[in-house]
């Protein structure tokens, strides 16, 4: 995992995404066996490296933390949920280009 991307667990999700974060958080729900998820990984690393602290990117491995995927109604992966102020403000499903991801993030900044 990149130093610019937070790995989320059942234990730290609320703190990192819902309570503590003062900036928007893009949470990527993924799995090791998912081809599109693997393709999305490097794009999200680039986006995270370019964020300048205006937002954060985090990842949830749904095989390790299925409760989080269930709680947030993640039916397909990759699914990226954008949170702001502890609330879901946007949802992106599937592999998409970096510019489209950035545009959706910038829309809530």
Image (cartoon, helix red, strand yellow):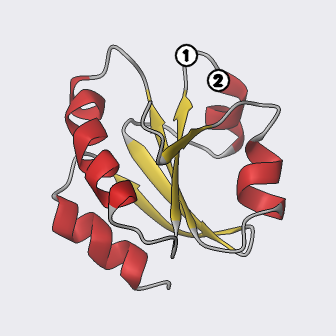
Residue situated in front as seen by the camera: 88 or 50: 50
Which residue is disc 2 drawn over? 66
Q: Position of residue 95 (x, y in %)?
A: 22, 46
| Separation (CA) of disc 1 from disc 2 | 6 Å
Q: Position of residue 27 (x, y in %)?
A: 53, 50
> Dot 1 lies on which element?
loop
Crowd rating for badge 1 (residues with CA inside 10 Å; few <14, some 14–19, many 20+): few
Residue situated in front as seen by the camera: 96 or 47: 47
- Seen in the picture, residue 11 relative to 79 is either above or below; the reply is above
Say which residue appears at 32% left-offset and 49% top-offset: 44
Q: Which mark is residue 89?
A: none
> Dot 2 lies on which element?
helix
- Seen in the picture, residue 38 relative to 56 is either above or below; the reply is above
Q: Position of residue 91 (x, y in %)?
A: 46, 61
Q: Which mark is residue 63?
A: 1
Q: Mark 1 and 2 residues: CB-CB less than 8 Å, in contact? A: yes
Say which residue appears at 77% left-offset and 31% top-offset: 10
Q: Position of residue 50 (x, y in %)?
A: 32, 65
């Amino acid at each position: 995992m990149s130093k610019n991307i937070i790995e989320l667990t059942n234990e730290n999700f609320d703190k990192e995404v819902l309570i503590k974060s003062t900036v928007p958080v893009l949470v990527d729900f993924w799995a090791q066996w998912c081809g599109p998820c693997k393709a999305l990984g490097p794009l999200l690393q680039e986006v995270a490296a370019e964020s300048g602290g205006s937002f954060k990117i985090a990842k949830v491995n749904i095989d390790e933390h299925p409760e989080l995927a269930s709680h947030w109604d993640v039916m397909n992966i990759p699914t990226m949920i954008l949170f702001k102020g502890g609330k879901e403000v946007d949802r992106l499903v599937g592999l998409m280009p970096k510019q489209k991801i950035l545009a959706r993030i910038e829309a809530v900044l």
